[in-house]
Image: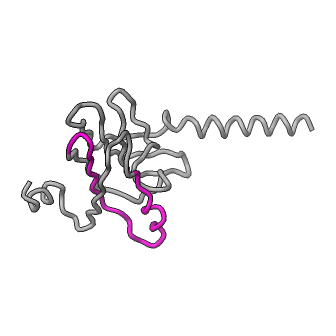
Amino acid sequence: MKKITILITIIATVILVGCSSYKNSDKVELLSEKKSPNGKFIATSFSCEGGGAAGYFYFNANLRRVEEELDQRDCLLGKHKTWMAFNDIRVRWIDDSNLEISYKQNNSPAYQDNNSVKVSSKFGINIHYVVNNEGKSITEELKAEGK
């Protein structure tokens, strides 16, 4: 009985350490970072891969205070943060209290529930989402709007 208790304790410790160390083991690539006009916040689009043999790779966006480090699991898009449900994510500040995020998303039925979850406001900043599955760049979209 004592050996089983020790074995369970060791397994639980390995699982907890493995699950809590994702920040150190994930490979994060910053694709775009934009400071808010007032310089207080940073909006970031990034990719992340990790997870060892089971593995995951995803794109997402993050909003944080300028003095904070990026947490790749503090994402703005999706119910399941490590799903590859979004790509070509672009961030653009409209003004100090409005952020626009444009992206392409997987529209298959399996992703409907995941893709319906998006953070609408953080730190008092309203977040506006634009699904851009037509393939236009954000520059093309701004030109079409006359901006």
Q: Nearer the viewer, residue 29 or 81?
A: 81
Establish if 67 lies above or below 125: above
Span shown in magenta = 95-119
Q: Position of residue 118 (x, y in %)?
A: 41, 55
Q: Position of residue 50 (x, y in %)?
A: 48, 44
Outermost residue to the right: 1
Kindly identify the residue that appears in the image at 26 percent across and 48 percent down: 91
Residue 54: say if magenta.
Answer: no
Outermost residue to the top: 67
Q: Which color scheme is applied?
A: one colour
Establish if 107 lies above or below 147: below
Q: Name which quarter of the figure residue 28 lies in.
A: top left
Q: Nearer the viewer, residue 143 or 31?
A: 143
Establish if 14 lies above or below 143: above
Kindly identify the residue that appears in the image at 65 percent across and 37 percent down: 16
Q: Position of residue 106 (x, y in %)?
A: 38, 65
Q: Nearer the viewer, residue 14 or 80?
A: 80
* In the image: residue 17, left or right of residue 3: left
- Where is the N terminus found, in terms of image quarters? top right
Kindly identify the residue that appears in the image at 18 percent across and 58 percent down: 137
Residue 106: say if magenta.
Answer: yes
Q: Name which quarter of the figure residue 111 lies in.
A: bottom left
